[in-house]
Image (spheres, grey):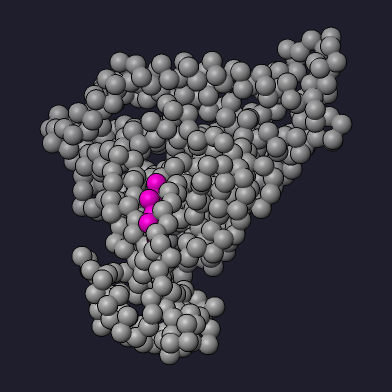
């Protein structure tokens, strides 16, 4: 059988017209209408379709396919309405999902009702020379309902090229349009419902004018960040997956950093109040996020231990899961409180009026000049503080450098659009290598301290507590070794970051050009 070819019917087309013309050439044999209902799942930020795949769910059966319909795996899976990767059993389906969904949950995005009519064309010898199917579909996405443009799927048979040519010519004459490669069912559904996949992206994006005042720039940036908080609020409250809370907290953290970095250019009294409120917001969401980090590392922690010590961690994760339920209730109460509502409402009002205020002249300063000044200052501080670090330097200095690096990166991302963007993006790649080193060092340090504190609280009087103590002890040793390994790589990582080519690249960012960017490599 040759490859199927899909055609879109002209709007309002009467199929009886096509059938009448076909009956002049062949005998038509219809097999009746089939109806079926399918649910298509994807993550909230559309990771599957972005990777060129889709998942169809019928009951507890999941079919994982390319967008062109080629099935890659079909297995029974999770019964949960919004399953995570860990909810699927080991197998081909889970392996495929692991490549694209990561820690996000699969959500029912589209429900499609399909009516399919199959038709065979027979020649005078009563032999089937061609088949086609007429597909009529309606779909639901959230509370919306849409009728999709009907399809005719031509199914040529090998050895019968002449009937195929006749039918294709007829379809063209009737103005049927052949579907392009970018018109898969998923793409048609996204188009029908006006889905904008960029809206749910966690990447920061804000287009600024180089001529804008710093007050106008702060307004635009903070509105983007506020919208990111609100987009992730519902998923955080519903506890769909850990990324909602993570992205919510990132938006809060970016906001706090911006206010700290630009406090001289803003109404300081009001800004201090908002800084305190956003600090509170970070505090009330912190415990759940901290526990999420540990629970997400369940498999990694198990893999760090010898097989005989792994069972001891079971009670540890049960304790964490129980504590998370308590902290989640407290966090939800805070996010549904009047204090949070007033913060968001007051913040919106503050931002709306910010550029037009005349009670703080500093806000009228040019945003490009201010951003360049701060970025240069932060860069010099990083070079100075990083250059002082030696193998004997205390851990606290590396933690301070990590915070400085994060603020520096935020400034580059906030104002990327008013400098040389290609150079900025290239520079951020180099920055990421240093941040990864410092971030890993900090993570191992914090995790080691938490595990050590937990070990010190234990009273090893039962076999289970003894097993847990042994497992925690093993993890602490592993964390210490891993932290030291990352620490030994810092000096070289920092030297690479502080190299002349990166300093030159930073100058190209401010000059508005990227003449000879460093060679791009995949991390």
| 332 sits left or right of 295 in the view | left
Name the outermost residue toward the front: 125
- Residue at x-position 61% and y-position 56%: 73
Residue 115 lies in the magenta-colored region: yes
Residue 440 appears in which quarter of the rendering?
A: top right
Residue 392 appears in which quarter of the rendering?
A: top right
Q: Estimate the x, y position of residue 56 in percent, counting from the top left.
A: 50, 51
> Eyeballing the image, is 327 above or below 242?
above
Front residue of 81/384: it is 81
- Residue at x-position 70% and y-position 28%: 448
Front residue of 199/71: it is 71
Q: Estimate the x, y position of residue 472 in percent, counting from the top left.
A: 77, 25
| 232 sits left or right of 478 in the view | left
- Residue at x-position 58% and y-position 50%: 97
Residue 262 appears in the figure: no
Give the tally of numbered discs: 0
Residue 442 lies in the magenta-colored region: no
- Residue range (magenta): 111-116
Q: Estimate the x, y position of residue 184 in percent, counting from the top left.
A: 41, 63
| 294 sits left or right of 508 in the view | right
> Eyeballing the image, is 365 above or below 500?
above
> Eyeballing the image, is 330 above or below 238?
above
Front residue of 251/391: it is 251
Q: Estimate the x, y position of residue 191 in percent, counting from the top left.
A: 31, 57
Query: In which quadrant of the rendered image does the C terminus lie?
Result: bottom right
- Residue at x-position 31% and y-position 31%: 263
Query: In which quadrant of the rendered image does the N terminus lie?
Result: bottom right
Residue 312 appears in the figure: yes
Magenta stretch mostly in which secondary structure? strand
């Amino acid at each position: 059988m040759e490859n199927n070819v899909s055609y879109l019917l002209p709007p309002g087309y009467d199929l009886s017209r096509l059938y009448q013309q076909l009956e002049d050439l062949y005998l038509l044999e219809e097999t009746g209408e089939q109806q079926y209902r399918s649910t298509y799942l994807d993550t909230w930020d559309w990771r599957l379709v972005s990777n060129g795949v889709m998942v169809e769910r019928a009951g507890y059966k999941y079919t994982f396919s390319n967008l062109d319909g080629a099935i890659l795996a079909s297995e029974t899976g999770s019964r949960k309405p919004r399953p995570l990767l860990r909810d699927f059993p080991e197998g081909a389906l889970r392996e495929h999902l692991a490549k694209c969904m990561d820690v996000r949950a699969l959500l029912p995005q589209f429900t499609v009702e399909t009516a399919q009519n199959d038709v065979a064309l027979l020649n005078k010898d009563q032999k089937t020379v061609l088949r086609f199917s007429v597909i009529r579909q309606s779909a639901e996405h959230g509370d919306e309902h849409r009728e999709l443009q009907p399809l005719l799927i031509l199914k040529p048979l090998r050895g019968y090229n002449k009937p195929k040519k006749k039918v294709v010519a007829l379809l063209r004459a009737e103005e049927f349009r052949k579907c392009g490669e970018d018109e898969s069912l998923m793409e048609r559904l996204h188009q029908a419902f006006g889905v904008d996949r960029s809206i749910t992206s966690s990447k920061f994006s804000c287009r600024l004018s180089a001529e804008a005042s710093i007050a106008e720039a702060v307004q635009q940036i903070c509105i983007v960040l506020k919208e990111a908080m609100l987009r992730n609020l519902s998923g955080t409250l519903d506890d769909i997956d850990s990324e909602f809370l993570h992205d919510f907290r990132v938006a809060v953290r970016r906001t706090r950093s911006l206010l700290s970095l630009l406090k001289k250019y803003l109404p300081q009294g009001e800004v201090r109040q908002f800084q305190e409120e956003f600090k509170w917001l970070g505090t009330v969401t912190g415990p759940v996020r901290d526990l999420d980090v540990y629970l997400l590392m369940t498999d990694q922690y198990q893999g760090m231990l010898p097989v005989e010590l792994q069972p001891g961690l079971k009670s540890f994760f049960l304790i964490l899961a129980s504590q998370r339920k308590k902290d989640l209730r407290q966090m939800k109460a805070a996010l549904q409180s009047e204090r949070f509502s007033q913060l968001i409402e007051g913040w919106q009002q503050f931002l709306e009026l910010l550029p037009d205020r005349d009670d703080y002249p500093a806000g009228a300063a040019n945003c490009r000049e201010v951003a360049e000044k701060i970025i240069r200052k932060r860069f010099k501080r990083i070079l100075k503080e990083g250059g002082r670090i030696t193998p004997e330097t205390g851990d606290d200095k590396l933690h301070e450098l990590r915070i400085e690096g994060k603020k520096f990166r935020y400034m580059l991302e906030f104002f990327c659009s008013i400098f040389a963007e290609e150079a900025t993006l290239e520079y951020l790649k180099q920055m990421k290598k240093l941040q990864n080193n410092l971030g890993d060092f900090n993570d191992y340090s914090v995790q080691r301290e938490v595990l050590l504190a937990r070990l010190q609280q234990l009273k090893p009087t039962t076999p289970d507590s003894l097993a847990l103590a042994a497992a925690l002890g093993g993890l602490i040793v592993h964390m210490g070794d891993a932290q030291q390994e990352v620490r030994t790589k810092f000096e070289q990582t920092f030297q690479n970051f502080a190299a002349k080519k990166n300093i030159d690249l930073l100058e190209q960012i401010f000059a508005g050009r990227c003449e000879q960017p460093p060679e791009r490599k995949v991390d």
